Amino acid sequence: MAQVRQTKQRSIIEEEVRKFKTFFTAEEVHEKVRERDPRIGTATVYRYLKDVEGEDKPHYYYCDRKKIYSFKSDNHCHFYCTVCGKTSHFHIEKIDFLKNSIKGGICHFQIDVYGVCDDCQGK
Ligand SMILES: [Zn+2]
Ligand SMILES: [Zn+2]
Ligand SMILES: [Zn+2]
C-alpha cells in the first residue's frame, strides 16, 4: 500500500516540477504539490529531486544560500557588491573561454563575481 501511495506522490511532484520554466526551489515545488496532496512533505520533494536519474535530473545551483534547480542547463551568475551587500544576477551565454582550463565536459556553471556596484561607485 505504502508503495502505491509513494508512486502517486512522485507523479504529482513530477507533474508540478515540469511546470517550472526556469529556476525553482524545493520549497516552491512543495507549495504546488501541497495544494494537490497535503500529505506530501518537503522531505519527499527533496528525495524526489535527489533521486531523479539520468537526463531528467535537474541541474542545481546555490542562490542566496538556497539550493535552486533547473531542468535546462542554464547558467547562473551573481554579482555581489562588497560595499552595500546587494546581489544582482547577470547572464553569460558563452563559456568557451573556460574550456581550455577545465578537463572534462562542462554541463552548466555558476559564477560569483565580487566588486562594487554602480550605485556605490557613484558615491
Ligand atoms: Zn548541469
Ligand atoms: Zn542567484
Ligand atoms: Zn553597492
Image (cartoon, rainbow, N blue to C red):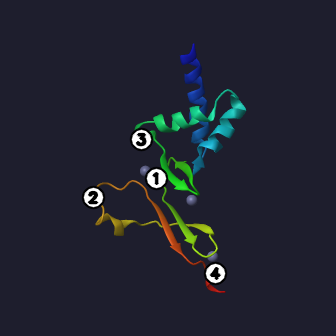
**Residue 118 at x, y = what percent?**
61, 81
Q: Secondary structure at mark 4?
A: helix
Closer to us: mark 1 or mark 4?
A: 4
Q: How many marks?
A: 4
Residue type (three-letter) at the residue carrying disc 1: Ser
Q: Which residue is mark 3?
A: 55
**Residue 21 at x, y = what percent?**
58, 49
Q: Which residue is mark 1?
A: 73
Quarter containing the C terminus: bottom right
**Residue 103, labelled with which disc?**
2
Whole-angstrom CA distance, mark 3 to mark 4, is 43 Å
Q: Is residue 85 above or below residue 15?
A: below
Whole-angstrom CA distance, mark 2 to mark 3, is 21 Å
Closer to us: mark 4 or mark 2?
A: 4
Whole-angstrom CA distance, mark 4 to mark 2, is 38 Å
Q: Secondary structure at mark 2?
A: loop
Q: From the Cβ of disc 4, is ligand 3 less than 8 Å away?
A: yes
**Residue 39 at x, y = what percent?**
67, 26
Q: Nearer the viewer, residue 93 or 39?
A: 39
Residue type (three-letter) at the residue carrying disc 2: Lys
Q: Secondary structure at mark 1?
A: loop
Q: From the Cβ of disc 1, is ligand 1 less than 8 Å away?
A: yes
